[in-house]
Amino acid sequence: MRWDIFCQIVDNYGDAGVCWRLARSLSSLHGQEIRIFCDDLPTLNLLASGVDPVIKQKIDLQPWEASFSNARHPVQTPDVVIEAFGCELPERYLTGMFIAPIKPIIINLEYLSAEPWITDFHAKASPQSHGIPKYFFFPGFQDEVGGILVDPVPPEGISVANKIPYDLKGAWSKLRSDTKRISIFCYPGAPLRKWLEDLGSLDENIDVLLTHGHAELLNLYGEQPIQLPANLQLIPIPFVSQDEFDWVLSQCDFNIVRGEDSFVRAQLAGKPFIWHIYPQEDRAHEVKLAAFLDLYLEIANQELRLATIAAMTWAMPSEWFHMLDTWNIHSQAWRTQLLKNQGDGGLAARLLRFVA
């Protein structure tokens, strides 16, 4: 089948990352023909860099405007159209579908959620005045919903520790032995300076890997340069592709991630993590975080539950860091459970079965 995926980027990496990973899974694992129309093609191309060229060349990456009906880029009616995260299809693209002899199915791919209510709305029809069939599709962790993107399943960190990506060799050469590693990929609103200063007060050597742009975040608004003790070392790393970032997550003892794609990848890395969920004005993000934690901590003891909730809500490391070893065991068990629950192929496979 032929699929068109439309992606308008709100969170630079999260939205594009999900669309790229979905396209990659549908193409490389399921033999589907995929086009992506994106309003920020440079970001999408960055995320797709570093991928096996054989995989990348199977996916047609196009700017948003290329979906318009004109001589250079005529509309070719696909079998399935995905509106990623509720983005609206371009009017001229819709017009092309109206006159197509065989109408496609439109899928409104929603944001990943662990909230119980999504089971009542998943895969339900969304009647449209134009008559083209449209459905809601909710990614999630429960069996009754759309699943998560698991491809490619990252290997255990210890098995690939020596396979350092070329772009990361410089940063990796600065790491100290017998030192804990933390990676940080968060939104600007995080209390990062205070968090790091508290982390430095612990009696432990820690190397902190700052993803692209985060070193600059620590010195915004004319603040004094951050002063940290010698036991804490900050190491900026360059922008890396999805697969390379997966490797970083697997090599750290703790990860701070944001958005949807890195949130799932942190779980599949089997390591403790903070999900810096995208903040919303109506505080809906707090409800989504609480719903996830209800699932994630379902079998955890009370001490671990309290420590994890504290960490996820940006309590200072000194309040919960002593639970890291216990949290690590829990994270490995959660990874095993996730892979078992997504053994049917997860989101990409469930989408295929739905439209078949």
Image: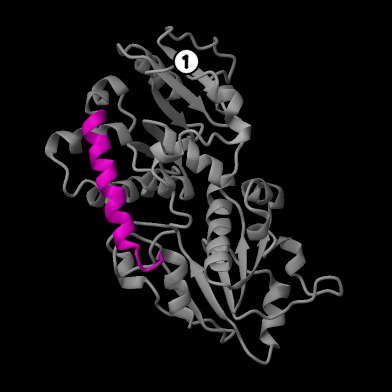
Query: In the rendered image, which residue does mark 1 sit on?
Result: 233
Quarter-wise, where is residue 149 in the image? Answer: bottom left
Looking at the image, residue 75 sits to the left or right of residue 59; the answer is: right
Q: Position of residue 266 (x, y in %)?
A: 40, 43
Q: Residue at x 59, y 45 (%)?
A: 12
Determine whether 136 is above or below 52 in the image: below
Quarter-wise, where is residue 88 in the image? Answer: bottom right
Taking the magenta stretch, the answer to whether it contains residue 200 is no
Q: Which residues are magenta?
A: 324-345
Q: Residue at x 19, y 38 (%)?
A: 305
Q: Residue at x 57, y 63 (%)?
A: 23
Determine whether 109 is above or below 106 in the image: above
Q: As drawn, which residue projects farthest toward the left?
A: 302
**Element class at badge 1:** strand
Looking at the image, residue 42 sits to the left or right of residue 322; the answer is: right
* Front residue of 87 and 336: 336
Q: Position of residue 268 (x, y in %)?
A: 38, 48
